[in-house]
Image (spheres, helix red, strand yellow):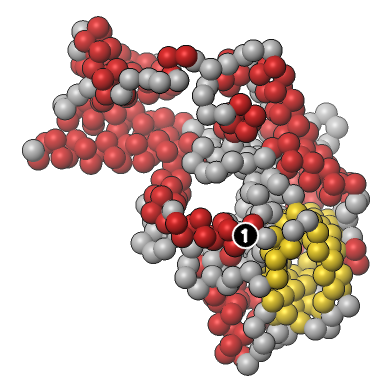
Amino acid sequence: MASEILEYSAAFVDAWSTPGGPPADAPDGPTNRVTTELSVIDDGLAMVEAFSHCVAFRTDDGLVTFDASAVFFGEAVMASLRRWADDPVHTLVYTHGHVDHVGGSGALLADAAARGHARPNVVGHEQVQHRFDRYRATDGWNLNVNARQFGPRSFGSGSTFLPESTAPVTHPYRDRLDLTVGGVEFQLHHDLGETDDHTWAWIPSRKAVAVGDFVLWVFPNAGNPQKVQRYPAEWAHALRSMQALEPELLLPAHGLPIGGKERVATVLDDLATALEGLVRDVVAAMNDGAVLDEIVHSVKVDDDLIRRPWMRPVYDEPEFVIRNIWRLYGGWWDGDPARLKPPPAGALARELADLAGGTQRLAARAQELAEAGDHRMASQLIELAAQASEDAGVWRLRADLYRRRAHDEVSLMSRGVFNEAARSSDARADDLDAG
């Protein structure tokens, strides 16, 4: 019997990879589902859809699971897994150390203890534990980033960013690890991509790749403006390595599994092509002497490619990836000499406000531009006005303009930053009114 979830994903891939473009009735979503429900993909293979997913293989020696989801999905994920299989979890593989992949591991350990099972082996790249150390050292920063990126009630808010119950890596590896559990071989590969500690796996007996976040069913998270360096060229290389194996099943940590060699090849090729094109064009422009501003506003991803459901910039977006490519190859300076050692932002804002005839003129012009749909310029002017002003009305206008901008944005990252700007503006206005 065909897997229902594979039939569901096939409808997306088949429709959107049709020569000449998708038909009018092509399915358009949802593709990222957070249900904590388990889907059987094949005999002895299941996926629990959460944030992130947990992929489980049954072997003669117990279960091998890829990722454990986030801390507040952990118990629900284990409950769904246990309705499918009572086998001990022999090995937990971290595809990488992001908290939505490792935070639920405490529930997995608790389940093992309650059942009298041996503590699972925890396998991951050697950099995963270093990531955990960094998370603990920058706990407040990461809590603030998550609140801004996902909203004030996002996972991790109000506690430590990395849950204290997170299982440490007990079996680290460096480049590749051939792991056999209960007669099933798992070939683990390390590649740079979204992180420096990422693992993807080839399972020969299934002709399957477990890809973690190398495939997200959104545009690759290779630009995130609030996080550490991403690696777009190496990400594309990893996708090409997977494609060369001709897998017939792709098991991601977000989005839908994909069955069928041609479908898997299509998705891998699309993602790699987009990343390769961005790297190629940005580096070429850098070699020609272009500055970051010129590159950001000239380098694009093909519209037909980015419209596909597994490519859409609803989380990260190409503009941010371009900036990350620049940072990787060119450093943090954007090429504008005035911004190498600029004056304090507030001092510059006051100077420009004086030249413009006051903060109210800047604010009024910002409002005009926002109403005309020029959010980029409106944001620049309202920032100058707010930084130069102690007027609550200016700060309330700033809040309004950023709420409008957030409403019109596509990517979650942009909306998160702009909504946070609106919230902080309201708070500042309240303080000014109270004072």
Where does the C terminus fall, quadrant-wise? Answer: top left
**Which quadrant would residue 45 be assigned to in this image?**
bottom right
Is 370 rendered above or below residue 424?
above
Q: Which residue lies at the image location 39% right of the left edge and 64% below the top edge?
A: 159
Query: Is residue 283 found left or right of 332 in the rendered image?
Result: right
Q: Secondary structure at mark 1?
A: helix
Q: Relative to the observer, which residue lies in front, 417 or 163?
A: 163
Report the amino acid beneath label 1: Val
Q: Residue furthest left?
A: 435
Q: Which residue lies at the image location 69% right of the left edge and 54% below the top edge?
A: 198
Q: Which residue lies at the image location 57% right of the left edge and 29% below the top edge?
A: 331
- One can see residue 14 in this view: no
Query: Is residue 292 found left or right of 28 in the rendered image?
Result: left
Q: Which residue lies at the image location 78% right of the left edge and 56% below the top edge?
A: 175
Query: Is residue 376 found left or right of 70 in the rendered image?
Result: left
Q: Measuring from the top left, give residue 380's x and y in whole percent.
A: 37, 20
Is 220 rendered above or below residue 19?
below
Q: Measuring from the top left, give residue 185's x and y in whole percent.
A: 87, 70
Q: Measuring from the top left, give residue 346's x and y in whole percent.
A: 27, 24
Q: Residues within 10 Å of mark 1 (few under 14, many from 20)?
A: many
Where does the N terminus fall, quadrant-wise? Answer: bottom right
* Residue holding disc 1: 128
